[in-house]
Image (cartoon, rainbow, N blue to C red):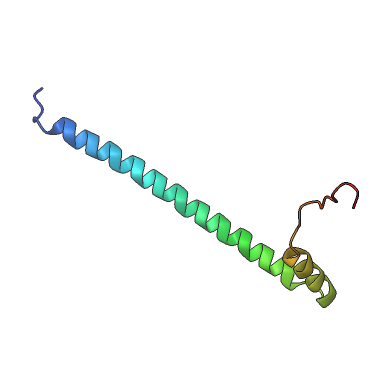
Amino acid sequence: MDICPGFGTLLMNESAGNVQNTNLSGRNIANIAMGSLQAGVARTHNEMGTEESRAISGVMATPIAPPSMQAAGA
């Protein structure tokens, strides 16, 4: 059976296209999962009371400083 000279090229293009489509599908699934996670977090924080929300905001907004060192003899 004879095959046309471009048959190998066609197979390679088909294979590369399949890999790219699989990667694209994986990225789309990951985007959906991250969106669901973000929606869940937003909903959880939305259900908290005023005190809890303020406490979390305060903790998240508080900068963390390195340990302070006093000079010897100070």
Please say whether residue 48 is visible from this viewpoint: no
Relative to 5, residue 62 above or below: below
Residue extending farthest to the front is 73
In this rendering, does residue 50 appear at all? yes
Q: Quadrant of residue 18?
A: top left
Count of numbered tags: 0
> Residue 24: image x %, image y %?
40, 49
Which quarter of the rendered picture does the N terminus lie within?
top left
Q: Quick check: 36 left or right of 46?
A: left
What residue appears at the point 34 percent right and 44 percent down from the top-left corner?
20
- In the displayed structure, 51 sits above or below 14; it is below
Q: Along the line of sight, which residue is nearer the eye, 27 or 6?
A: 27
Identified at 74% across, 62% down, the residue is: 63
Please state if 11 lies on the left or on the right of 63 as rendered.
left
- Residue displayed at 57% across by 57% down: 34
**64 lies left or right of 6:** right
Image x and y of residue 21, in percent: 36, 47
Q: Residue at x 76, y 72 (%)?
A: 47
Where is 52 relative to 22, above or below? Answer: below
Q: Residue 26 or 51: which is nearer the viewer?
A: 51
**In front of the other: 63 or 26:** 63
Report the residue that reaches farthest toward the top. Answer: 1
